[in-house]
Image (spheres, rainbow, N blue to C red):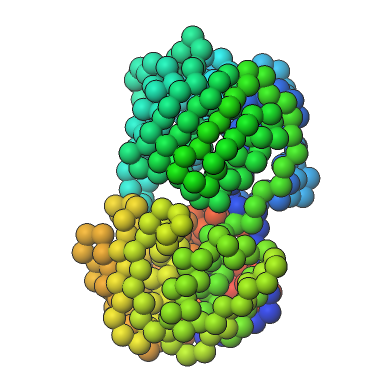
């Protein structure tokens, strides 16, 4: 079990490069199940644990996956299977996205029902209702969901909540269904646009990606494609917050400013200076931040995946701030670990009240999920003394070589095997 050891209290300076987006690469790779033709995906964060799980999923279903640097080539390797193995789905909830492409192509798919996770239940009922609207039938059997349809039909799907995963799932299936499918109350995240671009390269027609109404005109047979994944906006936002918390001047190379407007507006209100240029963003911060309250919301609102790193920064604010979590019901597990470092946080339901302290102190702490782990890194970089973070495997699911990137910006961070 690896640990991260961080000696805090050192300003971050220089530059750190953002990897390709995990949340964009994952559905794009799974969308290669829509075709037997070769697909080449560039800028893939291949070292991430979730991406390695995705490669295993594709291979278990009958694809050949070849990796060269940050490029992944996915090609046919015999007949595709229509049953996803539980041992892979239980490791990564997004594995359930394989159901849509396989159902659209073969009319039958069996996938294990993914359980909850540390940050909440995250049910897939919204996905299933979408497939029913396209003509699928659903049967639950011994922990699995069996979806069947003689042939999916194009239609209208309206979500009760703009779920990113459900939007991506229906878009993928609709790409292989002849006719026009309309998704209403669709998610608007940049990762939706990236998937739409890939589906168009395969041969589908997509309009409205990035808005609440997405139209997909599918084709029964799709071709191959070459595509480059967008930069990871959550990683970029995490580094911006880390640079602000540790003070100094940090350039985040590869960050897309347009993807982070909600975050940078709040950071500026808290006293950080943010400079934007083509292909990079630079944060400059001195001293403690002003207290600024946030509420998470679907894009273009403040992203739930940056709530935890933001809360870690607000632990140092000159006064009281509030964080309201509206997307997941149990996403304050990092609060107890930050309290071990001297933070003053009171959690009640979906709201955390933070009374800022002058400084945090290093302590042994542990990550409970990907973004909680990122929050602990932000706090550790700002804290006085040594922090040892356990359960680093959570962090490895979403951040590629994070300690090496931080060392390049002047942090004292190293990985050890416990």
325 to 84, vertically: above or below: below
**Residue 337 falls in image quadrant:** bottom left
- Residue in the foreground of this view, choosing between 98 and 180: 180
Residue 355, x across and y down, in percent: 29, 80
Q: In this view, does 343 lie to the left or right of 249?
A: left
- Residue in the foreground of this view, choosing between 108 and 370: 108
Q: In this view, does 142 lie to the left or right of 39?
A: left
14 to 258, vertically: above or below: below
363 to 399, vertically: above or below: below
301 to 31, vertically: above or below: below
Residue drawn 39% across and 22% down? 132
Residue drawn 55% across and 72% down? 240
Residue 251, x across and y down, in percent: 65, 75
Residue drawn 42% across and 17% down? 135
- Residue in the foreground of this view, choosing between 233 and 361: 233
* Any part of residue 88 in sight: no
Residue 265, x across and y down, in percent: 47, 72
Residue 162, x across and y down, in percent: 40, 44
Number of numbered discs overlaid on the protein picture: 0
**Residue 367 falls in image quadrant:** bottom left
């Amino acid at each position: 079990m690896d640990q991260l050891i961080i000696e805090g209290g050192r300003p971050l300076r220089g530059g750190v490069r953002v990897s390709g987006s995990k949340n964009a690469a994952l559905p794009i790779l799974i969308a290669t199940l829509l075709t037997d033709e070769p697909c080449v995906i560039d800028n893939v964060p291949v070292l991430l644990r979730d991406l390695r799980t995705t490669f295993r999923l594709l291979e278990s279903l009958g694809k050949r996956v070849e990796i060269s640097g940050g490029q992944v080539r996915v090609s046919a390797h015999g007949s595709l299977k229509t049953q996803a193995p539980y041992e892979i789905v239980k490791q990564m909830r997004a594995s359930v996205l394989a159901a849509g492409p396989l159902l659209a192509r073969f009319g039958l798919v069996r996938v294990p029902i993914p359980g909850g996770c540390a940050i909440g239940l995250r049910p897939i009922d919204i996905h299933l209702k979408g497939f029913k609207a396209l003509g699928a039938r659903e049967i639950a059997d011994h922990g699995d969901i069996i979806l069947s349809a003689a042939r999916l039909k194009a239609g209208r799907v309206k979500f009760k909540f703009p779920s990113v995963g459900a939007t991506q799932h229906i878009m993928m299936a609709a790409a292989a269904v002849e006719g026009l499918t309309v998704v209403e109350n669709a998610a608007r995240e940049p990762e939706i646009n990236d998937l739409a671009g890939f589906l168009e390269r395969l041969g589908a027609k997509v309009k409205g990606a990035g808005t609440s109404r997405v139209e997909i005109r599918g084709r029964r047979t799709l071709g191959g494609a070459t595509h480059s994944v967008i930069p990871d906006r959550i990683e970029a936002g995490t580094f911006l917050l880390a640079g602000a918390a540790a003070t100094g001047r940090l350039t985040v190379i590869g960050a897309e400013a347009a993807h982070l407007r909600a975050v940078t507006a709040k950071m500026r209100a808290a006293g950080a200076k943010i400079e934007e240029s083509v292909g990079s963003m630079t944060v400059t911060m001195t001293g403690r931040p002003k207290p600024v309250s946030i509420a998470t919301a679907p894009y273009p609102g403040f992203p739930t995946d940056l709530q935890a790193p933001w809360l870690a920064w607000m632990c140092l604010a000159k006064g009281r701030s509030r964080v309201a979590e509206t997307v997941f019901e149990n996403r304050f597990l990092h609060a107890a670990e930050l309290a071990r470092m001297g933070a003053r946080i009171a959690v009640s339901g979906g709201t955390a009240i933070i009374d800022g302290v002058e400084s945090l102190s290093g302590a042994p702490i542990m990550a409970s999920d990907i973004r909680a782990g990122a929050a602990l890194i932000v706090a550790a970089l700002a804290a006085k003394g040594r922090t040892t973070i356990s359960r680093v495997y959570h962090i490895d699911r979403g951040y590629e070589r994070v300690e090496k990137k931080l060392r390049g910006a002047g942090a004292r961070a190293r990985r050890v095997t416990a």
